[in-house]
Image: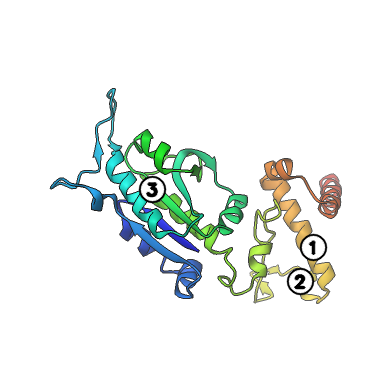
Amino acid sequence: MHIEVVTLFPGMVRGALDFGVVGRALSRGLLHLGTEDPRAHTTDAHRTVDDRPYGGGPGMVLKPEPMLAAIRAAQARAPAGSVRIGLSAQGERFEQRHARELAQLPGLVLVAGRYEGLDERVNELGVDRELSIGDYVLSGGELPALVVIDAVARLLPGTLGDERSSEEESFVAGLLEGPHYTRPESFEGRQVPPVLTGGNHAEIRRWRLKQAVARTWQRRPDLIAAHGLEPEASAVLNEFLTERSRSERT
């Protein structure tokens, strides 16, 4: 996959991607990253990329000329079929389903805004869709762009050491992950659940499903309401709730 990021701070983007899973994808050639600085498309001595908003108001707005020129330069390097995405608080909430969808594309052009945002004509002429990573205010779109890159990169075949990892993570089936344990078996009086050391893979799989369903019901019931449950997951949830009710009565 080829990803281009239009940003006023290319060093911020590149510097954050040299590590972990994304760094591995880059070093293996599974992911190619480019950046385009709108300042390179200015014509004045001060390399001006922003100006005061028409109609007044606080803050500055990114100008259409350098922003669109940067987007088009980045798009020219991206493969055919790439999608131009603006990172914006007004965008659709970015979720795992979006990461899976974007991971199937040949490329992305991510547009990171700053200040009060982009001149609306940039959105009209240079952006295909907008995504938001949450309902809060950030200083710019670089961090959201990094979030999108990380979520997408880990889904690319060959990025993770064990391909099952991306299939068993939180949100993949609309559920949070259950608890994980490693050595030592006993730590400060707390034991690893016996089922995990017993070697019965069918029991382990069912225990993990039950833990995932229970944790989702307790912490993110909205996920269950939104996605529903498969029959087996629904059965283990009923089992968990029955056990919980009995425990509360004793």
Looking at the rendered structure, the kind of residue marked 1 is Trp
Q: How far apart are marks 1 and 3 (CA)?
A: 42 Å
**176 relative to 59, above or below:** below
Residue position for label 1: 207
When the figure is inspected, residue 140 is found, relative to residue 236, above or below; the finding is: above
The earlier-in-sequence mark between 1 and 3 is 3
* 1 and 2 marks in contact (CB < 8 Å): yes
- Dot 1, crowdedness within 10 Å: few (<14), some or many (≥20)? some
- Residue 112: image tag: 3
x, y percent for residue 196? 76, 71
Q: For the residues marked 3 and 2, what is the alpha-carbon distance in whole angstroms?
A: 44 Å
- Asked whether the beta carbons under mark 1 and mark 3 sit within 8 Å of each other, the answer is no
Residue 72 x/y as whole percent: 36, 50
Mark 3 or mark 2, which has the lower sequence index? 3
Q: Disc 1 on helix, strand or loop?
A: helix
Query: Is 71 left or right of 219, judged from the image as shown?
Result: left
Looking at the picture, how far across and down is residue 70, in whole percent?
32, 50
Return the residue at label 2.
Answer: 196
User: Within 10 angstroms of label 3, few (less than 14), some, or many (20 or more) residues?
Assistant: many
Residue 206 x/y as whole percent: 81, 63
Q: Residue drawn at (65%, 60%), measured in percent from left and top?
A: 169
Task: Give the amino acid type for the residue marked by disc 3 in the picture.
Answer: Ala
* Most foreground residue, 93 or 6: 6
Of badges 3 and 2, nearer the viewer stands 3
In the image, is 190 to the left or to the right of 235?
Answer: left
